[in-house]
Image (cartoon, rainbow, N blue to C red):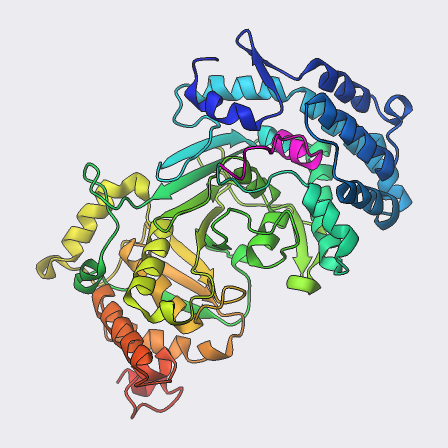
Amino acid sequence: MEARGDLRSILPYLPVVLRGGALFWPPAAQEALKALALGPDVSRVSSGDVLADALTDLRLALNLDPLPRRAAEGFALFFDDLLSRAQARDWFDHVAPSLARLLLRLPTLLEGHYRAAGDEARGLRILSSQYAGLVLLSQELAAALLACALFCLFPTADRAEACLPAINFDSLFAALCYNSRQSQEQKVRCLVHYFDRVTASTPTGSVSFERKVLPHHPESDGITYPDMDTWMKSGVPLCTFRVFSSGLIEDEEQEALEVDFANRYLGGGALSRGCVQEEIRFMINPELIVGMLFMVSMEDNEAIEIVGAERFSQYMGYGSSFRFTGDYLDSKPFDAMGRRKTRIVAIDALDCPTRLQFESSGLLREVNKAFCGFLDQSNHQLCAKLVQDLNTKDNCPSVIPDECIGVSTGNWGCGAFGGNPEIKSMIQWIAASQALRSFINYYTFESESLKRLEEVTQWILRHRWTVGELWDMLVEYSSQRLRGDTNEGFLTWLLPKDIPNGDVDYMCE
């Protein structure tokens, strides 16, 4: 075990120790977990207040600081005041002891994980910037790691310097005390429901976490970071584009890449006060949070793809209106690696881009970020050949191959990040097409600026535009916006002025 580079890279960020070729809990921590595992009659942990004290004892046994005061108050508030008495009793009688027993098995689960991983290609490790790689975890190991996060047992001293997001749940519970929005309580309810489920029945699948990189310089025969000229000359046909004014990405019925409107730090404000698209997805699919343990923040040429994260919760609302509404039974089928066929790709947009989103550098950054996320790097040789063939006019089919699954997305980077929805919809279409995705299902969330999106995309498809042609028009429009030559939205600017608003049939005659 000592010789494994993957284990050495992650070990400083785990609460266990390596000694004599085996992993262990420190003795004092193990004794504290054993007591908790025996239930409240032995541990005396029967309230949120006492649980917070027990977590401080555990942290001290791991040479960590005591649980922060606000976090301790948050644990007490949630388990003693916000949960019903029946729910709290069940939690302390059954769920908390089961989680302690799961944590006692963490060293064994980790050792089994590294044995099953064989070489270091899939082992748990820090996935550093500019190094493409994949980590494959069992759902049981993921649950144990999330139990560590709930009990705030991960060392945190060097995480910020390593550009790793926060992973313990202390800030999540602390925010209950000074955040009057009920959405914070509802986020915790989603996670508590997850622990209810996994302690009642251990999940048996797998989840993979992949860092995807578009290298700036050629590496072997892979696809590199495209420049402006590459996009302008692309002869790849645009893929099918379907517009939905209602519906949610996570409810997508077709197999597709489901876009996470991400922060450069995976998870964004999921474990603090955030409650928009990314944070909500992490609450209803809590196994996504595990990636926050080992995924270094993303650079402009990187994306993160997570396959197999199970959904556990139903919800309604958004932001301050977010509410946990009950259990969700995920019926997605499994692939050959034991992962549910839920593919989530995290791509971070420019934050408050204003003029930058119309400049060439901003357009190039955004389209390459989306392209990195949408490209199947595992088949990069096939993709490179197909792109080369598609760029040859004599060998240019009119459609993308049907076997390439599509993309389910929406107004990426257009909420708190302040992006332009018309620009972002076209950028994602261009990127998905160049990545040889067969379709985009675009959820507008009833955005007023996208009311003509279906008309425009259908007009473009009828005219059989290529990626390069749409990119050329996007660059030209952006140049005019920067010069002040137009203040129209892109969709209105693009269409010929003699086309009646909404007359799709007329447009395509």
The reply to whether the magenta stretch includes residue 154 is: yes
* Rendered location of residue 480, percent (x, y): 28, 80
Q: Quadrant of residue 440?
A: bottom left
Compare residues 14 and 314 and report the one nearer the observer: 14
Nearer-the-camera pick, 315 or 144: 144
Residue at x 63% of width, y 22% of height: 106
Q: Is residue 93 left or right of residue 272?
A: right
Image coordinates for residue 349, horizontal then vertical, percent: 43, 59
Question: Observer-nearest residue: 158 or 439?
Answer: 158
Quarter of the rendering containing residue 275: bottom right
* Residue at 76% across, 59% down: 182
Q: Residue at x 73, y 42 (%)?
A: 192
Name the residue at 79% across, 52% down: 177
Residue 91 point in image, percent of width and height? 82, 36
- Examine the rendered structure and indicate whether residue 259 appears above or below residue 47: below
Q: Is residue 160 magenta?
A: yes
471 vs 202, left or right, is: left
Tell me which secondary structure the magenta stretch mostly adopts: loop
Can you see residue 403? yes
**Direction from residue 245 to residue 435 in the image, left or right:** left
Residue range corresponding to the magenta coloring:
144-161
